Image (cartoon, rainbow, N blue to C red):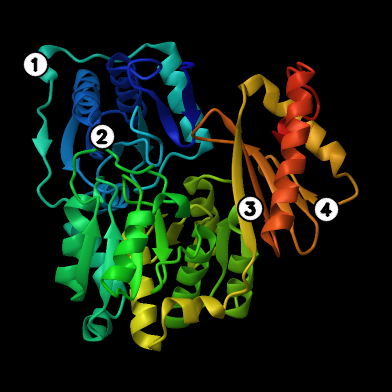
Amino acid sequence: MKEVLKVGVSGVRGIVGQSFTPQLAAAFAQAFGTFLDEGVVIVGRDTRTTGPMIEQAVLAGLLSVGCKPVTAGVIPTPSLLYLVKAEGARGGIMITASHNSVEWNALKFIDRRGMFLGPIHAEELFDIYHQQEFPFVREPDLRSVSIHEKGVAPHFERVVEYVNADAIRNARLRVAVDCCNGVGALYTRSFLEARFGCTVFSVYDKPTGLFERDPEPLREHLQLLRDTVTTEACQIGFAQDPDGDRLAVLDETGRPIGEEITVALAVSAVLRNHAQGPVAANLSSGKSVEHVARQGGGEIAWTKTGEIHVSETMRTIGAVVGGEHTGGIIIPAIHPCRDSYGGMAVILELLALTGKTVSQLCADIPQYCLIKDKVPIGAEHAPGILRQVRRAYEGHPMRFLDGVYVDFGDRWVHVRRSNTEPVLRIIAEAPTREESMKLVDDVKARVGEVMRDGHKGKVGPEAKYS
């Protein structure tokens, strides 16, 4: 397997034992401690088997430059983000590769606002790392590592405060959940049972970090959850990724509604039951989200892919809800981050207050077919491929905010480099599956042409669009 290290606004991630090692984790922790100029740093992780090893390296790196590390243990990413802000810490590090497969791990860097580093601060951190000039402290000045006792409680309490918890309890909902043997295996069942009175049927609910299904909660990976929804006569099914920031929803028949409809459903819930206002979403989020936003009286702002891009745009325009097409629901009134727990709560609230089924609620949202595909590429090929896509569709409206987005009116295709994998992502949406597949296949054919020609994507005047 080719060694890959992905460095950017999604943090630093790679394959453990190849591009991602304890030595690298310690050095990045030293750089982050230098960037913060000491202070309290809260560290959390998901359940991956490599997590404890990487955690020890991170703690050592932070200690060596004078920080005071506080460990939160195995904790959902949104809970750690909330905790950093609530506790007034200087920053935080989440050890998780999110939806990537088990051989990957990563560091995600959190600022004192409880948000991931934006592009400018991330570049500053990476510059510090590359210089390798860290202010190591002397032995008498070394701090101690402490354990944070509150864990998920502050975050979960805020979620419960935000929604009409009594209405959810009175609805006595039957819920199936797929925790992917990730952080949700420790917290999700009790979150739904104790706080909302749900009857819960859980699968892949052991916090082993041994993922028995692909960790990305796509419809093709959720067969056991689908069976559980139908067998146990549940009103809804929820699936999480290993660190608990992404959410997928199944209706009462066991049908996955799709990640983009999941976000649209959450947007509808917030606009209907909590606040009206602007909505922000990344370019690949689809026409369903746009329709729901405008139907609810709000305008939609499009952003680059990456949680921090959506969160910062939401803060700038005062958005009341938003998210990413991967099932990342962001509700700033809870915390401006992707949050499967906030997402579950507002969708359960919507079921309780309307008395409708999930399929009935989805019937009110225009249905398109969104298809996601990816092609492995080297970074050097991306600019040439994106230029080829631009030339192929010239004459159609385009956006260059994040790769190339081509708008055909009732359909669109979005081509961009991934922030988290060494791949080119191709996302297309159209009224039918056949039309969506045609857009994807057309782009893939053009990618093949560039790869066959040995185009190296040399930096030129158009490279900025990549």
Query: Tag 2: Cα neighbours inside 10 Å, few (<14), some, or many (≥20)?
Result: many
The answer to whether residue 291 is above or below residue 414 is below
Rendered image: mark on residue 140:
1
Tag 2: residue type? Arg
Q: Which mark is in front, 3 or 1?
A: 3
Q: Residue at x 11, y 30 (%)?
A: 145
Q: Which of marks 2 and 3 precedes in the sequence?
A: 2
Image spot of residue 163 (x, y percent): 31, 76
Query: Tag 1: Cα neighbours inside 10 Å, few (<14), some, or many (≥20)?
Result: few
Tag 3: residue type? Leu
Q: Which of marks 1 and 3 precedes in the sequence?
A: 1
Tag 4: residue type? Pro
Residue linked to disc 4: 397
Name the secondary structure under disc 4: loop
Rendered image: mark on residue 48:
2
Q: Residue at x 79, y 32 (%)?
A: 387
Residue linked to disc 3: 283
Q: Quadrant of residue 408?
A: bottom right
Q: Which mark is in front, 1 or 4?
A: 4
Q: Quadrant of the C terminus?
A: top right
Image spot of residue 94 (x, y percent): 30, 38
Residue 429 appears left or right of 363: right
Q: Quadrant of residue 230?
A: bottom left
Tag 1 and tag 2, C-beta contact below 8 Å: no
